[in-house]
Amino acid sequence: MAKNEFVKEIADIETDFPQWYTDVVLKTKLVDYGPVKGTMVIRPYGYAIWEHIQSELDGRFKAMGVENAYFPMLIPMSFLTKEAEHVEGFAPEVAIVTHAGGAKLEEPLVVRPTSETIIGHMFGKWVESWRDLPLRENQWCNVMRWEKTTRPFLRTSEFLWQEGHSVYETGEEAEAETLKMLACYAEFCKEVLCMPVLTGRKTEKEKFAGAVATYGMEAMMHDGKSLQAGTTHYMGQNFAKAFGVQFTNREGVLQYGYTMSYGVSTRLIGALIMTHGDARGLVLPPPVAPFEVVIVPIAQKKEGVLEATHVLKETLEKAGIRVKLDDSDNSPGWKFNEWEMKGVPVRIELGPRDIEGGKMLVCRRDTLEKQEFALGDVAAVKDLLAAIGKDMYDRAKARMQSRIVPAETLEELLAGVEGGNFVRAGWCGDRACEDKVKAFAQATARVFDESHTMQTCVCCGKKAAHTLFFARAY
Amino acid sequence: MAKNEFVKEIADIETDFPQWYTDVVLKTKLVDYGPVKGTMVIRPYGYAIWEHIQSELDGRFKAMGVENAYFPMLIPMSFLTKEAEHVEGFAPEVAIVTHAGGAKLEEPLVVRPTSETIIGHMFGKWVESWRDLPLRENQWCNVMRWEKTTRPFLRTSEFLWQEGHSVYETGEEAEAETLKMLACYAEFCKEVLCMPVLTGRKTEKEKFAGAVATYGMEAMMHDGKSLQAGTTHYMGQNFAKAFGVQFTNREGVLQYGYTMSYGVSTRLIGALIMTHGDARGLVLPPPVAPFEVVIVPIAQKKEGVLEATHVLKETLEKAGIRVKLDDSDNSPGWKFNEWEMKGVPVRIELGPRDIEGGKMLVCRRDTLEKQEFALGDVAAVKDLLAAIGKDMYDRAKARMQSRIVPAETLEELLAGVEGGNFVRAGWCGDRACEDKVKAFAQATARVFDESHTMQTCVCCGKKAAHTLFFARAY
């Protein structure tokens, strides 16, 4: 019966993954569509996930010495044009404020699509000496990129993110920080989202507009497609020159700084949904789940049941576990389905017989396995939550590894990506070959494979300069 | 010597308070001007204060059952016009996006000046039954109001705030929540910002555009002017009717809900600066100070001094105290001035003789009093921080109370506000009298005084309907 209920509610994950995704994000009330095309409302159940992501990442940044700040959202249009590649990349997708305070503005203002330009301008005002460096600031804010096709969390005109921006004395330091932040992101994905990622460098075609080098992390979604989950950028002196970020160096000579930036967004919520979700709906990683445990009373009108569930809730909460007690009038079966769809990692059922026997029935959302714990055994619940997180990561990691396949020819590459794999292939380094692969297989270069195991270019057959991961991507 | 140094740095607080404020916020690096007129950059030292404000308030909201969400920033222009008073109040100061994605938009979009309209629209989609109520959501976000004269934190085109929005079944519940949130704000100001406020209802002239009733809290600045520090609004069914927020009530009848909203912003940072600051600069309330304690090593090149300061820092941090150790090459005198200007509540000086004697010299920022504590006495430092907070509040409260004066005539009222007081005066309730007071005394009606002690209208001499506080205001 339970099975039938969600068949009605959400599309089949294997045969119609896009519709499954839409059904799940709307029906679990993570998100809703905003009134303006391409916008989303992040509802409390979704926003709570974002708050956990923020809190976990922010702590990591602060431990690394990064400080938070806030820069204005409106950027003079002229700023964008100061870095030639940057304006080319972002001008087509910006939203523009032309009128304000009842009058036409002298200069149109761009709603930030990213803040390298305005932060570069301010850093140029603030940095004077090598003693001011490194300067490492981060902001949590909204950004806007006008997109033609949108999907909640994955691609919306407005989204929430963090963007970190740093200036260093040397290019080596700035590039080292770019890799360090990529590693920080990947570790965060593993430990907090239970989500494995492939990390590496992006091709020139795929890099950030204005960067010397972009590094990215790619996660494998349920359908085998890739999702870019975060990027870090080494800018060299490009933005420092455009915005006059100069300092007197240790030799007393005025020189330009070296900058880098890094960002992850509410897209991560889409990534974790599409990594861990199953036929019944969401499967949330315990570290970011709004509720780690849901308690469902059985025969809740019987004397003592509701009281016992309240006591259990308090006991678990005192131990720092986030708990929902569903004492609504709905049937237990309805509640099981509801909270399974909503992906709560652990469900505890508690009825008169359990209470009498000093037990509770504990059900894992990820495997649907049930086991009995002693009633109120907080340590066992904590261990189980940790085990769920680890198992979710291990399964996702094994799945991703089993779906990385090599290709020596374009046909093999096409078959690979059609089969829902990441394809490892040699690449000569030419943009023309990258373009041909894209046209032939509708697959894009994701990141370089550091292991460099492929010898010849999958496209032209010349000696490979790099080994690249190709995939179809969100 | 120390005294002379800040005389050079910041304007005199008594004779040129506006310039003192500008000097302090810029030189302590709380804030900088953004490139677009009327915008501000909140720098790390200022943003850390905002983070503490957020964290403290957010915890209070969550404890009351309010959930966080995020609504889109761009609002269709047509939404604004659905509530007649609302559009009249906000249309003149909105920023408008007319172009996006390389094309002109069909309908111009307003950058939210506040979100009653778009949240009303979404609540209209979500609310169906009385079982869905109350619905209580809050968002932390940026908003934009194009202002002619601006000042960092106090009035800028873009600022950060929280806005809470709720729907209730009955007007009584919604109005009770409006008062409850006002009380929550006032308690927060007392406990976290150490700042007393006057609370009460706003006049029709001063209320929120579209509200039935607005309540506000007013804080007294160093120059005796008032600053509106937060407001809560009871909307009746105005917005529910404009946006179709309807539900089936307990009798099975479809009816409109009753809504309310409430907000405080980064303006609170300006309020606490102008409440507590003194001739030397900032005096920060311990609960929101980025650093509660600064440690200044004395004769830091002497063996053992830096080591001892590091140990002390760790000891204090382990107890949850936020500590800055200034081991830079600057002289102790320079550091004293710097951290006094930056308002750190407690300075600890530690030199060879202190270490030898097992003591540390502890200096309060608020009173500049010094005392000796046993080296590493965490409990004494914690007690001192609590005492500082309490004393800051008590002093500010006594000052405000001593500067609330009654007026029976317009001349008395003028003398009162010119002397830097809040003036308590009777008011007949007519807008014309309120306008006349404003023209005569350049003072505005702040909030109703619940004690209602004045008998006749200060302007027309008729029977007073209310007792109002008048003040010059920021």
Image: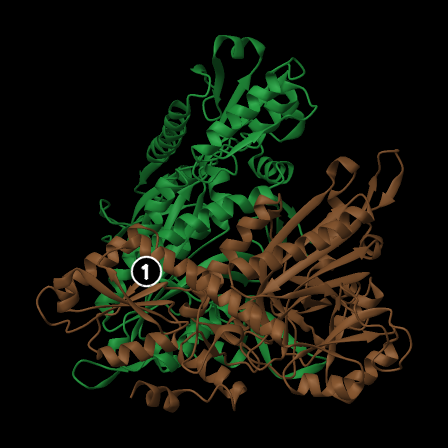
Chain colours: A green, B brown
Residue hosting label 1: A430
The picture quadrant where one finds residue B3 is bottom left
How many marks can you see? 1
Q: Position of residue B247 (x, y in %)?
A: 82, 41
The picture quadrant where one finds residue B358 is bottom left
Q: Position of residue A174 (x, y in %)?
A: 27, 66
Near-viewer residue (B460 or A138): B460
**Type of the residue with mark 1:** Asp
Q: Quadrant of the image for the C terminus of chain B?
A: bottom right
Q: Position of residue B238 (x, y in %)?
A: 83, 57
The chain carrying label 1 is: A
Near-viewer residue (A401 or A262): A262
Q: Residue at x 9, y 70 (%)?
A: B302
Vertical side of A222 occupied by B461: above or below: below
Q: Position of residue B56 (x, y in %)?
A: 51, 54
Vertical side of A316 occupied by B135: above or below: below
Q: Is residue B13 visible?
A: yes
Q: Residue at x 38, y 78 (%)?
A: B341
Vertical side of A140 occupied by A446: above or below: above
Label 1: state its secondary structure. loop
Near-viewer residue (A470 or B421): B421
The picture quadrant where one finds residue A26 is top right
Tell me: A286 left or right of A147: left
